[in-house]
Image (cartoon, rainbow, N blue to C red):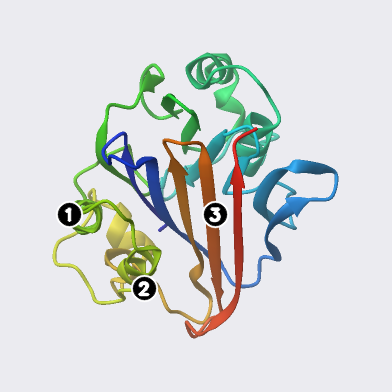
């Protein structure tokens, strides 16, 4: 149950403050965040099974993230495509986020349920193929898990509140953001009927950080986009037992 928390145009120094946990099966092969050899402008981790990514940015100031929309028991479309290619494709394009989201909507039925954030300096769009028209994201603090944007799941609500507390003051402490997402204590309440109970009867979906031998939090990423154009991207990877296994850190100016 991935979790993306972000503040859009809600801080005097940063246009975007985003922190995300990627939860995935541990057996799925993954490469840590890096600039891709075939595209030196694209910075992201890589899903080595399907070739896409769950979150990334580029030197032009574009950024994107995707989460799955959980639908227990629902079959996927025939000849379905990897949702990870949605992020990669946007980072390789030049059209505005909302324009790109509208173009994608026409072919979104090729994918299982997804939530997609597409952004660049000055504009952030949201699209789900389980919701209506794509739309621009309003300024404020938001949360996205495996349902629609800002769905009032307990951990989404708690995450938004915790992120808002991290925004106090001029500076952003990335260490505090990583600590926020490392919390593995259960949060009271449950998600939409049938989703939380079906996917994790032991209550894993109600935690920010998931430790489990089969499925759990594989990485945490902090992305800061300054109003001045400076981008900071830091990713921490984890073993199945939750121990850190590596850190990738990058900083650059939007070109």
Quarter assignment of residue 107 = top right
- Relative vertical location of residue 240 with respect to residue 162 in this rendering, above or below: below
At mark 2, the secondary structure is loop
Q: Disc 3 or 2, which lies upstream in sequence?
A: 2
- Relative vertical location of residue 148 with respect to residue 174 in this rendering, above or below: above
Residue nearer the viewer, 71 or 89: 89
Q: Disc 3 or 1, which lies upstream in sequence?
A: 1
Q: Residue at x 73, y 50 (%)?
A: 50
The residue sitting at the right extreme is 38
Nearer the viewer's eye, disc 3 or disc 2? 3
- x and y percent of residue 48 in the render? 75, 58
Label 3 and label 1: CA atoms lie apart by: 22 Å
- x and y percent of residue 112 in the render? 54, 38
Q: Residues within 10 Å of mark 3 (few under 14, many from 20)?
A: many
Q: Are dots 3 and 1 in contact, CB under 8 Å? A: no
Q: List the residue tagged with mark 3.
A: 233
- Relative vertical location of residue 123 with respect to residue 164 in this rendering, above or below: above
Q: Residues within 10 Å of mark 2 (few under 14, many from 20)?
A: some
Q: List the residue tagged with mark 2.
A: 182
Label 2 and label 1: CA atoms lie apart by: 15 Å
Q: List the residue tagged with mark 1.
A: 161
- x and y percent of residue 235 in the render? 55, 63
- Relative vertical location of residue 209 with respect to residue 34 in this rendering, above or below: below
Q: Residue at x 52, y 43 (%)?
A: 230
Task: Tell me the quarter of the image containing the C terminus.
Answer: top right
Task: Tell me the quarter of the image containing the N terminus.
Answer: bottom left
């Amino acid at each position: 149950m991935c979790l993306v928390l972000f503040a859009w145009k809600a801080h005097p120094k940063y246009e975007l403050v985003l922190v995300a946990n990627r939860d995935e099966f541990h057996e799925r092969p993954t490469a840590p965040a890096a600039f891709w050899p075939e595209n030196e402008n694209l910075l992201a981790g890589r899903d080595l099974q399907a070739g896409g990514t769950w979150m990334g940015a580029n030197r032009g100031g574009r950024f994107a993230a995707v989460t799955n929309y959980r639908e227990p028991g629902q079959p996927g479309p025939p000849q379905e495509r990897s949702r990870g290619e949605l992020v990669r494709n946007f980072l390789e394009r030049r059209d505005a986020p909302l324009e790109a989201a509208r173009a994608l909507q026409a072919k979104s039925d090729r994918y299982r349920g997804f939530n997609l954030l597409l952004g660049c300096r000055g504009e952030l769009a949201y699209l789900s193929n389980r919701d209506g028209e794509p739309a621009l994201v309003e300024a404020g603090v938001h949360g996205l898990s495996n349902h629609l944007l800002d769905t009032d799941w307990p951990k989404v609500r708690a995450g938004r509140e915790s992120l808002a507390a991290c925004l106090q003051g001029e500076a952003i402490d990335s260490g505090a953001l990583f600590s926020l997402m490392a919390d593995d204590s259960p949060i009271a309440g449950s998600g939409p009927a049938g989703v939380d109970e079906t996917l994790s009867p032991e209550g894993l979906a109600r935690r920010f950080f998931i430790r489990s031998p089969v499925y759990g939090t594989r990485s945490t990423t902090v992305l800061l986009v300054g109003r001045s154009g400076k981008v900071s991207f830091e990713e921490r990877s984890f073993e199945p037992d939750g121990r850190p296994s590596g850190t990738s850190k990058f900083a650059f100016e939007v070109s």
